Amino acid sequence: MFASLSSRALGRDQNYETVILRTLNAFAVDVITIPNEEDLLWYVARNVVGRLGFVDCVIYRANAEETELTQVAALGDKNPFGRKILNPLKIKFGEGITGRVAATRRAVIIDDLAREEGYIADTQLARSEICVPMMFGDRVVGVIDSEHPTPGAFGAADQDVLVTVSAMTSAKLELLEEAERSRQRYEDLVRSHAALTRETSNRRALETQLADAQKHESIGRLAGGFAHDFNNLLTVVSGNLDFLRLTAPAPESAEFIEAAQAAAGNAATLVQKMLQYSQQSLLTPELLDLDALIRETCGWSKQALSAGVSLELDLAQNLRPIKADRNGLENALLNLILNAKEAMPKGGALRIATQSAWLSPADVAAKKLDLAPGPYAEITVSDCGEGIAPDAMPRIFDPFYTTKAMGGGTGLGLSTVRGFMQQSGGAVCVSSTGAEGTTFCLYFPTWNHMAHPPA
């Protein structure tokens, strides 16, 4: 019942290294979309630890007080069918091997359990054990444990693999907890605001804007925190992939390493988009000639347009300069250009225009912009496509929201545009009708702008 494909049994051959790379790569991609803790822990037990050869695996979850561990997911004798654990154990911190790992926060390998005092047998006696804690900073949130009937079944390489799995699992658990706290805070705000919105229609509009801003702020903090933690994990994965390439792997392994590196590169791009949305990306503002930058961006981005899409420029003369990050603005324009192209599958005209705009208090209120009245440089990107459905309009700037089919996009393009504009001191708004297509307007504060509106 304890049959295992451990590193020792596999002889640390190229096939086992391929299994590790493919399994960790799949986990790094899938972990982003796993929706809840239960799905995550059973995924780790079955699709990660199980595929890595630790067939007998039990995952423990710690209580909030960090006093007790409970078995919550498993693969092997404890899990004969479905998502069920036979007689789930509860172990106090400090008791047995698992409890000591939780108390000391240190991974252990036991070569011979027959010599180990305090060993707590579960379904049947084992002879060796490997046990790794799951951590949020200094907080213990659980333990990953595996046993084997043969003495000395586990080695340092097995421990390294489980430590990596534990770190990725812990980061996702922390993200899910923060998401739940954000949801609760948001629901509390909605309930509180509901009583206030009955006062006047103006008050209702104000509360709606406030709820939207708080929602994006909470999701932004969440996305930024996850992006930083996940980027650290990607650095480890990418570094080890680079090292494997330098070791001149067999031709059949090189293909898998290249696939893993490509996936890691895509994940790194996703992390950068999340940082842009959460307004935590590093920007280097500089004075920019807006018209010159747009001409340059449109020049190299034309190759991304379909054959039936024509690009029209209507650029104002003598616009006041703006101060913004060049790469960030180019990426924002490219996102809007690609968005317009996808809205016109049968072709059409894509129009980009600029002008100087003075936003009055009435303009700011009508466009629902979080801006002070005053002078701005305005960029409009318009298409003549199918338009945005009314029920989708309130969510188009939400991260990971997309109307595309599965695999058609991450849903981060427009959210990164919004994050960049807010981080640059500007704002973005959108208008759309089925008959006239969609227009996005970007507003940038002008550098050394006028103090009073034009006559």
Image (spheres, rainbow, N blue to C red):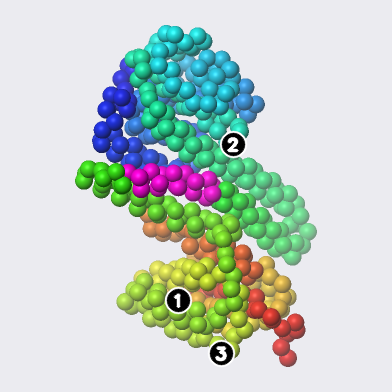
Q: Position of residue 269 (x, y in %)?
A: 44, 57
Front residue of 157/19: it is 157
Which residue lies under the disc numbered 3?
317
Of the two numbered discs 3 and 2 in the rendering, the one whose residue sits closer to the viewer: 2
Horizontal relation, residue 165 to residue 425: left or right? left
Closer-to-camera residue (255/419)? 255
Identify residue type, mark 2: Gly
**Measuring 32% from the left and 44% from the top, which residue is drawn there?**
244
Looking at marks 1 and 2 on the same chain, the residue that comes earlier in the sequence is marked by 2
Q: Residue sitting at 46 percent across and 81 percent down?
A: 295
Residue 297: numbered disc: 1
Which of marks 3 and 1 precedes in the sequence? 1
Residue 182 placement (x, y as % from top left): 63, 46
Real-space Cα separation, disc 1 to disc 3, in angstroms: 18 Å
Q: Quadrant of the N terminus?
A: top left
Residue in the picture at 43% in, 17% down:
110
Residue 95 position by quadrant: top right
- Please tell me whether residue 5 belongs to the stretch shown in magenta: no
Amino acid beneath label 1:
Thr
Magenta residues span 226-244
